[in-house]
Amino acid sequence: MVLKSLVRCVGVAMVLVSVSGCHSAYVEADVKNATASTISLVEVDYPSASFGKETLAAGETYHYRFKILGDGDTKVIWTDAARHEHTVKGPALREGQEGPLVVTIGDDTAHWDLRLKP
């Protein structure tokens, strides 16, 4: 009887959590290498953290999911095939934003495409 009541309470709690609108805002980021060569030491900095990949082959896309904690600027840093380091400043992000963000790395610059919701 106690077990039956416990199972019922857990079930009710799960339903309440699912309908209460619990939602965590995440950014779905893609970093694309649009150059003709492999790039290395790819790093994306965003408020309070960063992510990256050691190498990114020509035409390859790296996917990463993150949560914005705090407000601040972004930037992408990478080293091209000739071993030149590049840094391109990106947009400012705010805590709580969510949605897709794409960083396309070209030969000398990077383009940011974001469709984040507040």
Image (cartoon, rainbow, N blue to C red):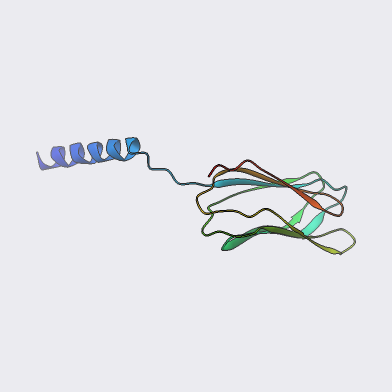
Q: State the residue in front, 14 or 118.
A: 118
Q: State the residue in front, 97 or 79.
A: 97
Q: In screen coordinates, is 17 left or right of 30?
A: left
**Rendered location of residue 72, percent (x, y):** 60, 60
Query: How many discs mark residues in the rendered view?
Result: 0
**Rendered location of residue 118, percent (x, y):** 53, 45
Q: At x 33% / y 35%, what residue is drawn?
A: 19
Q: At x 62% / y 61%, what residue is drawn?
A: 50
Q: In screen coordinates, is 105 left or right of 11?
A: right
In the displayed structure, would residue 105 be above or below residue 12? Answer: below
**Rendered location of residue 66, percent (x, y):** 56, 52
**Rendered location of residue 80, percent (x, y):** 85, 58
Figure quadrant of residue 101:
top right
Q: Quadrant of the N terminus?
A: top left
Q: In screen coordinates, is 48 left or right of 22?
A: right
**Which residue lies most toward the left here?**
1
